[in-house]
Structures are given as C-alpha cells and as structure tokens.
Image: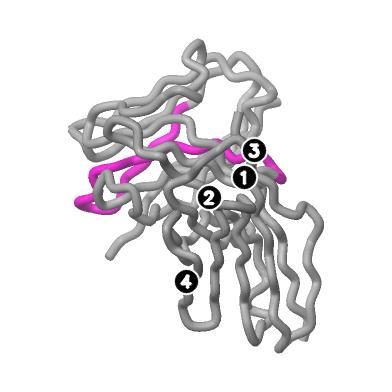
Amino acid sequence: EAGVAQSPRYKIIEKRQSVAFWCNPISGHATLYWYQQILGQGPKLLIQFQNNGVVDDSQLPKDRFSAERLKGVDSTLKIQPAKLEDSAVYLCASSLVRGAYNEQFFGPGTRLTVL
Amino acid sequence: SQKIEQNSEALNIQEGKTATLTCNYTNYSPAYLQWYRQDPGRGPVFLLLIRENEKEKRKERLKVTFDTTLKQSLFHITASQPADSATYLCALGGPQIYNFNKFYFGSGTKLNVKP
C-alpha cells in the first residue's frame, strides 16, 4: 500500500513570507496529524483531524498557522507570515481510525528553512 | 505540563550486545506508550505499543517494559546489529478525552551499533 505523501520535500523562504505544505494520507485513514519537528527535538503535535473535522488544535499557533483537510482526505498546512523559529521539519501522519492504540504512519516530511 | 525525558546523549554499543533505551515522564498519566524509529531525513516508523495495564511487550528482537509507578519505559534491542543504528523516540498517548487522544513525543535517543 502507498505511504503518506508530502510535498514539497524542501522549502526555503524569507521571514514574513507565506508557505503551504500538502499531505496525502494513506487511503482509508480517517485520522490525520500534522507535527512540527525542530532539529534535535521530538515531533510536536500541531493539529489532529478526524475525517474533515478538527479534534485537537491546542498546540497550533493560530495567529500564523492554519490547516484544513479537504473532503476528509488531503490536507494543507499554511504558515502566514513565517518567522525564523518556524524553521523545522513538518511531518504529516495518518492512522486508520481514531482509536487509542492505533499506530501512526508518517510521511517523509517537509524541511522548511526560514531566512 | 507533561515532560518526557529520553537520554540526549548517543548510546554507543558493540554489535551483538543488548541496547537499552530509557523513557521517563512526569506530570502525566498516559493510557499507552509507543516506540518509533527515525532515520535521518525520514519520518518516524512505528515499532511497538504497550498499554498502561501491560508490563512487557515483545516483538522479535525488541522488548518494551512499562512501569507506571516509576513512570518509566525501557526499550531493549537484543543481538543488536549496525542496521539498528537510528534515533528511537518514545511517544505517550491518552488519556482519551472526548473523542481524541493527545500525543507527546520525547526528543529521542540516537543509537550507534558498531560492527
């Protein structure tokens, strides 16, 4: 089965610019997650979707970050405007159902550099 | 707030030995704990899950223990191989609130297995 797809793989922008990341989860996976992983740290959950609804965005900096999941499948994460501290790898993951014990399948990530 | 600690120093061991990685947590009562492997430039890959009411879980050369009294999980790789060299992340999940679970990752421990 195809894995989680993300694009672009790399992005370099200047501060105050906008950027968007795209994620296509594994077919049939109801739950989708966006994580931010800063170099040397573990992934930090930004937002969690169940189908096309947000179930948890408590750690999403809503003044600059936004995310949507179109028709419960693909998802986009946007940063507007970007700050230097947003430099990180943005990981998308999906899981089959919204269960307590489901493993998450991660994409390769998008490495963002903000200059 | 919750805190998850993994040894930030790399663990260097000889091929064939058992690697033991530690995950400690505070201010949290997870319903379960997961271990992931992450290679450079890639997203984490799920390895094992252990629930709060389980003491030990095994999968091939992997073994995980979960002590909710000590608030600690140990991750063992027996008969380690150079191919096991990677960063290993622990992730705590739950408790299930409403319809979703919180996920918190540790910062990971880098394992180097020398031939």
Q: Are marks 3 and 2 on the same chain?
A: yes
Nearest the camera: B61 or A95?
A: B61
Mark number for residue B91? 2
Depth-wise, is mark 1 or mark 3 nearer the camera? 3
Q: Please tell me which of labels 4 and 2 falls first in the chain.
A: 4
Cβ atoms at labels 1 and 4 below 8 Å apart: no
Q: Is residue A27 magenta?
A: yes
Cβ atoms at labels 1 and 2 below 8 Å apart: yes
Per the model, the C-alpha gap separating discs 4 and 2 is 15 Å
Name the subunit of mark 3: B
Q: Mark 3 highlights which residue?
A: B3
Numbered disc 1: secondary structure: loop
Determine the residue positioned at 64% across, 40% down.
Answer: B26
Q: Which residues are magenta?
A: A20-40
Q: Position of residue A51 (x, y in %)?
A: 22, 36
Q: Mark 1 highlights which residue?
A: A42
Numbered disc 3: secondary structure: strand
Determine the residue positioned at 66% across, 47% down.
Answer: B107
Q: Mark 4 highlights which residue?
A: B57
Q: Residues within 10 Å of mark 1 (few under 14, many from 20)?
A: many
Depth-wise, is mark 1 or mark 4 nearer the camera? 4
